[in-house]
Image (cartoon, rainbow, N blue to C red):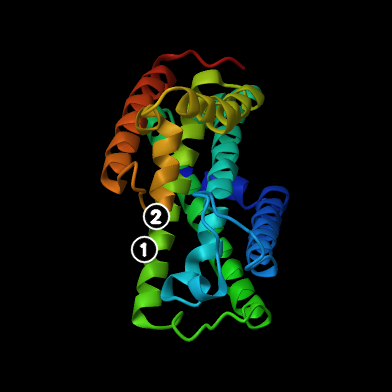
């Protein structure tokens, strides 16, 4: 198992993947955090249609505001990475070579999953550090007080936010891994995942009242938000776990029984 994890980690830490992903999440972190502080009190509104002010950001919860804004994009990045890293084993025919060295297919699947979860933890951690640093740098110019950010209430809120965003990011990543195992094509898996989460679910939730609480992407995203008035945090956790468990049971069975071509 450890060798499988190490082998997958070597793929994930390639400069073409690790550095590009770090650059993407860093750029998104700086962009969205900067937009919040540069447009403060000038009509910038959040996803819920509320306006953010310097007084709001000066509260203990202000330290995690920019971080939460990037959460949805972290999920999409994780979905794409998990899907591509899983499906390309079929595209490049490297899965056959892996099975020669490690015939136990479930160990390969578990090892790949663990390695990619560790990568997701790294990605979320980098994002948190950059958004917090950017918030502290931009706060004085926006007349936002940071006195309450370093209090026990602020750090507690940041810890809870980090945990929720991490769960949401891993959830989207596992969703992408399921698609990668199902379609065995990186392009198809990523296209279906992005199309479903960005377009189809939004259309369904807007067209059918109350449908959002049954959609996998909406529930996983809601975990990163820490729950909302319309959709509770506990329900999203249970629904997301149920969807992912069913999905993994199906694709794990397929992964174990499918023939592997050269």
Q: Position of residue 260 (x, y in %)?
A: 53, 16
Task: Give above or below for 261 relative to 167.
Answer: above
The residue that appears at 49% across and 28% down in the rendered structure is 206
How many numbered marks have been drawn onto this rendered protein structure? 2
Residue at 35%, 77% in the rendered image:
153
141 in relation to 90, above or below: below
Compared to residue 71, the image places residue 251 above or below, namely above
Q: Residue at x 70, y 58 (%)?
A: 27
| Above-or-below relation of 63 to 209 | below
Instruction: Judge whether residue 89 can be spotted in this image.
Output: no
| Contact? badges 2 and 1 (CB < 8 Å) | yes
* Marks 2 and 1, how far apart at CA: 6 Å
Q: Nearer the viewer, residue 45 or 254?
A: 45
**Residue shown at 58%/28% (left/top)?**
199
- Residue 14 in the image, given as x and y percentages of width and height: 67, 50
Question: How packed is label 1: few (under 14 Cα within 10 Å), some, or many (20 or more)?
Answer: some
Which label sits on residue 164?
2
Using the image, tell me which numbered label, if any, was put on residue 160.
1
Label 2 crowd (10 A; few <14 / some 14-19 / many >=20): many
Q: Position of residue 123 (x, y in %)?
A: 56, 56
User: x, y (%) of residue 261?
Assistant: 58, 14
SS for callout 1: helix
- Is 45 in front, or is 138? 45
Front one among 156 and 57: 57
Q: Secondary structure at mark 2?
A: helix
Residue 192 in view (yes/no) = yes
């Amino acid at each position: 198992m450890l060798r499988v994890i190490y082998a997958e980690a070597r793929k994930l830490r390639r400069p073409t993947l690790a550095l590009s992903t770090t650059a993407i999440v860093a750029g998104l972190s700086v962009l969205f955090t900067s937009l919040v502080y540069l447009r403060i009190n000038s009509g910038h509104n959040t996803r819920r249609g509320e306006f953010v002010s310097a007084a709001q950001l000066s509260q203990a919860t202000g330290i995690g505001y920019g971080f939460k804004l990037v959460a949805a994009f972290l999920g999409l990045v994780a979905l794409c990475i998990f899907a591509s890293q899983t499906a390309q084993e079929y595209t490049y025919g490297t899965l056959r070579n892996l099975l020669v060295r490690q015939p136990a297919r479930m160990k390969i699947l578990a090892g790949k999953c663990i390695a990619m979860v560790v990568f997701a933890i790294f990605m979320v951690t980098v994002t948190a550090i950059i958004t917090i640093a950017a918030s502290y740098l931009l706060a004085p110019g926006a007349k936002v007080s940071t006195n309450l950010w370093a209090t026990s209430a602020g750090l507690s809120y940041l810890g809870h936010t980090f945990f929720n965003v991490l769960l949401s990011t891993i959830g989207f990543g596992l969703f992408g891994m399921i698609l990668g195992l199902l379609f065995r094509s990186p392009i198809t898996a990523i296209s279906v995942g992005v199309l479903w989460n960005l377009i189809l679910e939004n259309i369904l939730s807007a067209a059918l009242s109350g449908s959002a609480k049954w959609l996998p992407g909406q529930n996983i995203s809601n975990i990163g938000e820490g729950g909302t008035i319309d959709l509770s945090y506990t329900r999203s956790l249970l629904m997301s776990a149920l969807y992912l468990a069913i999905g993994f049971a199906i694709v794990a069975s397929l992964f174990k029984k499918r023939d592997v071509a050269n």
